[in-house]
Amino acid sequence: MNENLAVLDEKFEQVGQVSVDDKNRVVLKKAIDMLRRQFGEELQSGIRFAVAYNSAGQILLSPETVIPLHEAWLYKNKEALESVHRGLDQAKHGKIKKGPSFAKYAEDDID
């Protein structure tokens, strides 16, 4: 875990109060519901948090996702990642070209 998590926005909204139960657990249902509304389906498969603690006793939970190792190369290759972002932006704005059909290969065996 990154020891120096970035605080991306210093404006926090209090969403309630919770207590620690006898197993040292804290229920964050309301905050998680808010995250799901903000990020949608991306959070349905599970959510992880980086946890940071400061000298004032504040705890910061930062939502994270796990990237499969076989996909990590993309995030390490700035040029490739920028190309993917460009392509996604072009598609979002309807700047796409219809390519050839691959229907003739649909019944091919894949080894």
Image: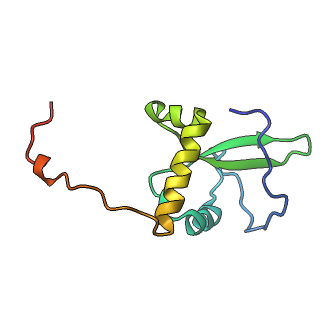
Seen from the viewer's position, the closer of residues 16 and 94 is 94
Q: Position of residue 60 (x, y in %)?
A: 76, 48
Based on the displayed image, in which of its 4 quarters is residue 3 positioned? Answer: top right
Is residue 27 left or right of 71 when viewed as pictured?
A: right
Residue occupying the point 51% across, 61% down = 90
Seen from the viewer's position, the closer of residues 46 and 41 is 41
Residue occupying the point 54% across, 39% down = 80
Based on the displayed image, in which of its 4 quarters is residue 110 positioned? Answer: top left
Seen from the viewer's position, the closer of residues 83 and 58 is 83
Q: What colour scheme has been applied to the protein in the rendered image?
A: rainbow
Quadrant assignment for the N terminus: top right
Residue occupying the point 73% across, 68% down = 15
Q: Position of residue 68 (x, y in %)?
A: 46, 35
Residue at the extreme right of the image, as rendered: 56
Quadrant assignment for the C terminus: top left
93 vs 79: above or below: below
Report the number of numbered marks.
0
Q: Position of residue 89 (x, y in %)?
A: 54, 60
Seen from the viewer's position, the closer of residues 67 and 72 is 72
Is residue 5 left or right of 50 when viewed as pictured?
A: right
Is residue 53 left or right of 32 when viewed as pictured?
A: right
Q: Position of residue 38 (x, y in %)?
A: 60, 67
Residue occupying the point 80% across, 58% down = 9
